[in-house]
Image (tube, rainbow, N blue to C red):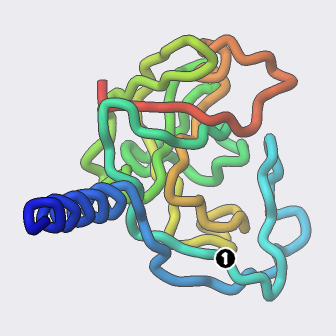
């Protein structure tokens, strides 16, 4: 009987540690501010902040593995696109025809993934894309973030080239469940 109880305790602790490794708890909230007229660029499924709405922020992202679950979103990294300013990694804009991505704050890891490649798996295909920017999960609703809310903690924000390489019809671009890994 003692062996069974010991086994159950060890199993419970191992399960809790596994769950903890896969979670990322919110770090706070910010209150939305109404964007000045014409300053929130709406692209595919982009939202503009709503006055007074509370938005969850994160300093972490789920643990990276060989098959990290994420939500693929679409972003324009071009000047004047819905991505806002130049990319965080190199201070440049990037063509929508180049496979580039922005990662949620925790995965961006203080620029440690800058200019490195990740492999995105979705729609039965894979594509390598370069990390050029952060999808900020800690801030939003201001001019630096194009008056858009903070990113969720599990986002791979991708250029049109990534969506095309995955063979997703343009009518379905917006959000898609994917897996990714460091290349």
From the viewer's side, name the closer residue of 112 and 71: 71
Farthest right residue in view: 37
Whether residue 87 sits left or right of residue 62 in the image: it is: right
Bin the neighbour count of mark 1 within 10 Å (Cα to Cα): few under 14, some 14-19, many 20 and up: many
User: At 78% across and 82% down in the image, what residue appears?
Assistant: 53
Looking at the rendered structure, the secondary structure element under dot 1 is strand
Residue 161: percent from left, percent from top? 61, 20
Tell me: residue 177, above or below residue 171: below
- Whole-percent x, y for residue 132 in the image: 43, 39
Q: Is residue 90 shown above or below 67?
A: below
Viewer can see residue 110? no
Q: Nearer the viewer, residue 141 or 28?
A: 28
Picture quadrant of residue 8 = bottom left
> How many numbered marks appear?
1
104 displayed left or right of 177: left
Depicted 103 relative to depicted 109: above or below: above
Front residue of 96 and 103:
103
Please report the residue visible at 59 percent of the width from the left and 83 percent of the height from the top. 29
* Residue farthest to the left, as pictured: 3
Q: Quadrant of residue 43?
A: top right
Q: Looking at the picture, how far across and down is residue 32, in whole percent?
A: 74, 81
Quadrant where the C terminus is found in the figure: top left
Residue 122 sits above or below residue 19 on the image: above
Residue that appears at 65% across and 40% down: 73
Quadrant hosting residue 106: bottom left
Q: Is residue 177 visible?
A: yes
Q: Quadrant of the N terminus?
A: bottom left
Per the image, the residue denoted by label 1 is 55
Residue 80 image offset from top left, x and y in percent: 72, 44
- Residue lying at 54% horizontally and 38% vertically, measured from the top left: 93
Residue 43 in the figure: left or right of residue 165: right
């Amino acid at each position: 009987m003692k062996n069974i109880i010991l086994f159950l305790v060890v199993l419970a602790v191992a399960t809790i540690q596994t769950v903890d490794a896969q979670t990322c708890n919110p770090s706070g909230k910010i209150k939305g501010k109404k964007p000045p007229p014409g300053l929130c660029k709406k692209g595919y499924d982009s939202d503009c902040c709503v006055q007074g709405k509370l938005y969850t922020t994160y300093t972490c992202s789920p643990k990276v593995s060989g098959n990290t679950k994420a939500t693929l979103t679409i972003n324009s990294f071009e000047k004047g696109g819905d991505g806002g300013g130049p990319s965080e990694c190199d201070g440049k804009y990037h063509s929508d025809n180049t496979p580039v991505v922005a990662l949620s704050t925790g995965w961006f890891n203080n620029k440690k993934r800058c200019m490195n490649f990740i492999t995105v798996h979705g729609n039965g295909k894979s594509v390598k894309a370069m990390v050029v920017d952060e999808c900020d999960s800690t801030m939003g609703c201001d001019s630096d973030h194009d008056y858009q809310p903070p990113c969720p903690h599990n986002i791979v924000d991708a250029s049109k080239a990534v969506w095309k390489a995955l063979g997703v019809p343009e009518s379905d671009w917006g959000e898609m469940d994917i897996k990714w890994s460091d290349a």
